[in-house]
Image: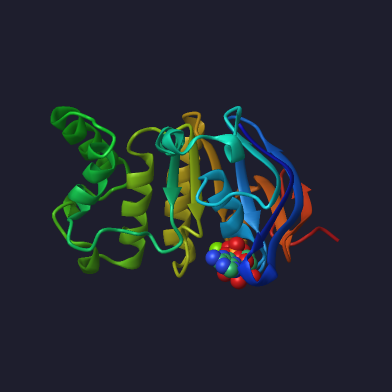
Amino acid sequence: MISFNMVTKIYPHNIISLRDITVNIEKGEFVFLIGPTGSGKTTFLRLIYREIKPTRGSVYVMGENLAKMKERKIPFLRRQIGFVFQDFKLLPYKTVYENIAFALEVIGYNPAEINARVNEILERVGLSHRKDLLPYQLSGGERQRVAIARALVNDPPILLADEPTGNLDFEAAKNILDLLVEANLHGTTVLVATHNREIVNSLRKRVIALKDGVLVRDDKEGTYDAQA
Ligand SMILES: Nc1ncnc2c1ncn2[C@@H]1O[C@H](COP(=O)(O)OP(=O)(O)OP(=O)(O)O)[C@@H](O)[C@H]1O
Ligand SMILES: [Mg+2]
């Protein structure tokens, strides 16, 4: 599904954010991407979304080499990937409903289908009663759920979530993760970048750890800290 082969990413000013990363993520996996701040987690996700290209090495997503992908094919790639951004990127002047519907409008769904899908996903994430509010009127956890609803509304085969539980207490974070686990049970391949030790430890999923851009650990039913 996702494959990195000796991927190095160097940003301007010679900032090396990933070094020689080789890793495969299979269809249907649930993976935590962990590591201290600045270790390269967001960079890893942005490479999969083709927001950026590797400096060296190759990234394959669903069989396509992203470095060779034509610009005009990028929207098709992104339609296959739900992305929950670290800063949510909700549109401030659109309601909860409109923020989610917009994701479907831009890819050409018809109004009846948009209405059905948005209402269904709002139900699933428990936000039906908030659908006419603007983002600033929501709590942090609610905003996070809107971002997840928007990423999942077109049933993408891949879901990338960048720190989807930042600043939430354990209960709220667990509720968010339950949504991602449920999507995974329906077949979505899920990759979650996080600092949330309790969540990682409670779920025992595959854990890929980065440190200074280097892949330092890849454990099957892993924990946040390396086992002694
Ligand atoms: N656009 C950019 N230009 C230059 N350097 C960048 C850019 N984006 C990220 N970096 C650098 O790359 C390194 C990795 O950043 P990245 O955002 O991937 O880390 P992260 O693991 O997601 O951190 P955090 O946990 O704080 O979100 C950092 O040293 C950062 O300063
Ligand atoms: Mg980050």
Q: In this view, does 50 lie above or below 140?
A: above
At 34% from the left and 34% from the top, the residue drawn is 154
> What coloring was used for the rendering?
rainbow
Q: Where is residue 21 in the image (x, y as percent from the top left)?
A: 75, 49
- Tell whether 44 sits left or right of 216: left
Q: Is residue 123 above or below residue 14?
A: above
Residue 73 image position (x, y, % from top left): 45, 33
Q: Residue at x 46, y 29 (%)?
A: 186
Q: Residue at x 32, y 38 (%)?
A: 153
Whether residue 37 can be seen here: no
Percent position (x, y) of residue 91? 25, 59
Tell me where residue 66 appears, x and y as whole percent.
Answer: 58, 38
Q: Give 19 or 71, whichever is nearer the viewer.
A: 71
Tell me, yes or no, if residue 169 can be seen here. Answer: yes
| Quadrant for the C terminus in the image | bottom right
Q: Name the quadrant containing residue 62.
A: top right
Residue 38 is left or right of residue 76, and the answer is: right
Indicate the quadrant of ligand 2 in the picture. Answer: bottom right
> Which quadrant is home to the N terminus?
top right
